[in-house]
Amino acid sequence: MQVQEELIRRRVVHTSPNGKNRTFSSNHCFAQMIICGNCGEVFRRVHWNNRGKKSIVWRCVSRLENTGLFCDARTVPESQIEQVLVIAINQALCDKDAFLVTLQNNIETVIIYENDQTLAAIDKRLEELQTELLKLASSKADYEDVADEIYRLREEKQKAQLDNVSRDELKKRITDMGDFLRKQPTTITEYDEPLVRRLIEKVTVYEDKFTVEFKSGVTVDVNE
């Protein structure tokens, strides 16, 4: 599987606690973003008619289908989630200096774990093994061990490439968050879907709070 294909596969699947993979089934901004703090399942958007009063709410799928998990997580109005995100983004803006320090530390941590040298070493070793393989094959000698090491190194190289691309994406997200904090002069006054898609990774719903995780890796708790 190619590196970009694998990254796409990772992005579009949520693995539930019962081992079930859930792919994106909705284009809604909150799809696969709202997570249950009780059982770890995703929340699903529901058009609710409660005693004649229509509304849109989000409920844990363990309360909507048989997942094998008991869950009594609360039902959350969509408007409440939108307001929570406004509060979380404004909290980041109001404490932007501390957030910018955290973001810089996150970037430094990402850079430390870059493995360009590892990739260079793998490529060099692969070249050596390819030469050795050709020599063994031309002399009709046993080359099974060399071939096995080549396959192993190719898998190691792909993993290193995936790790590097993932780190590059994370660095971009951290930089994007930093740019937003520096350029946004005031707090936001209303829910902004494009901004949420740009900044927010997930929202975990607990009984007494929401934990909002930004794509940059920082988190904010919004209490009830």
Image (tube, helix red, strand yellow):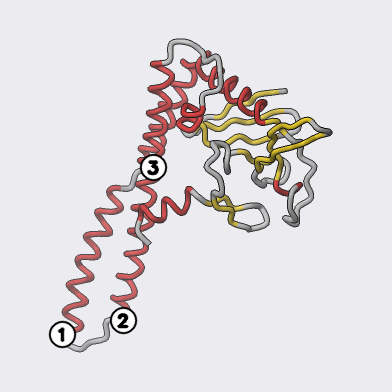
- Closer to the camera: disc 3 or disc 2? 3
Residue beneath disc 3: 167
Label 3 element class: helix
- Residue 144 is tagged as 2
Answer left or right for 106 relative to 57: left
Give the residue displayed 33% in from the left and 70% down from the top.
151
Tell which of 165 and 89 is nearer to you.
89
Label 1 element class: helix
Q: Amino acid at mark 2?
A: Glu
Q: Amino acid at mark 3?
A: Arg
Marks 3 and 1 sit apart, C-alpha to C-alpha, by 42 Å
Residue 179 lies, with reference to residue 159, above or below; the image says above
**Mark before the other along the chain sequence, 3 or 2:** 2
Residue beneath disc 1: 138
- Mark 3 and mark 2 in contact? Answer it, CB < 8 Å: no
Give the residue displayed 20% in from the left and 83% down from the top.
137
The quadrant in which the N terminus is found is bottom left
Find residue 191 and report its image quarter. Answer: top right
Residue 70 placement (x, y as % from top left): 79, 50
Label 1: how many residues lie within 10 Å, few (<14), some (14-19) or many (20+)? few
**Mark before the other along the chain sequence, 2 or 1:** 1
Find residue 174 and report its image quarter. Answer: top left
Residue 140 placement (x, y as % from top left): 20, 89
